[in-house]
Image (tube, rainbow, N blue to C red):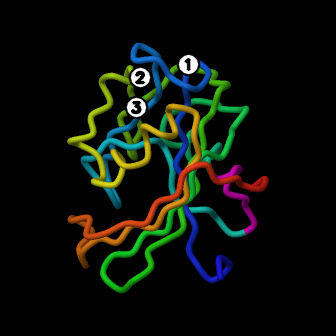
Amino acid sequence: MADDRDEATVCYPVRSDLPLAPDDELLMIRKRRGLGAGRYNGPGGKVEPGESPRESAVRETREETGLEVGDLTKRAEFDFFFGEEHIFLCHVYVAREVAGTPETTPEAVPEWRSRESVPYDEMWPDDELWLPQVLDGGTVRATFYFDDDGDELLDHELREGVEFGET
């Protein structure tokens, strides 16, 4: 059951409506510490007790970049396994309202990237399987199976065009 799983969020602030054109920008971070350190991703992290995934996405984006975001739409949901261990359920949002200037924090170095310059070779191996669909305005539900260390993607199950409730 979803209630028994740790939950996390990722948020991609954008400077345009979906679908993003090649020159349209999204905010990405290079993680400085923790899970995924050194990789590019969207701002995000664990959902705190008493917090909704949407609230977590807003808070984590603020903490990791200094930006305030709004008009969030859930675009994806994933289960991640490292070996036999279920790591977390991740909720992915796109934020169309963005205020402020991104700032480097102890957690992350934020940067606006054009869609055509998304550095898939410096991201989690699964990102190339789902992020293009999200940037095209689609929705995705997937399960990703990594090796015990979380370095190698071994298998996945992915469905496009799913509907999400308000979370």
| Side (left or right) of 11 relative to 29 | right
Secondary structure under the numbered disc 3 in the rendered image: strand
**Can you identify the residue that label 3 sits on?**
110
* Residue 55 place in picture, x, y as percent: 71, 50
Secondary structure under the numbered disc 1 in the rendered image: loop
Mark 1 or mark 2, which is nearer the start of the sequence?
Answer: 1
* Residue 70 place in picture, x, y as percent: 71, 32
Q: Amino acid at mark 3?
A: Pro
**Can you identify the residue that label 2 sits on?**
112
Callouts 2 and 1 close, C-beta under 8 Å: yes
> What residue lies at 46% left-to-right and 60% top-to-bottom?
158
Mark 1 or mark 3, which is nearer the start of the sequence?
Answer: 1
Q: Is 75 drawn above or below residue 48 in the view shown?
A: above
Q: Amino acid at mark 2?
A: Trp
> What residue lies at 48% left-to-right and 43% top-to-bottom?
43
Q: Amino acid at mark 1?
A: Arg
Eye-nearest disc, 2 or 1: 1
Dividing the picture into quadrants, the one containing residue 48 is bottom right
Q: Is 129 drawn above or below residue 86 in the view shown?
A: above
Q: Is 94 drawn above or below residue 36 in the view shown?
A: above
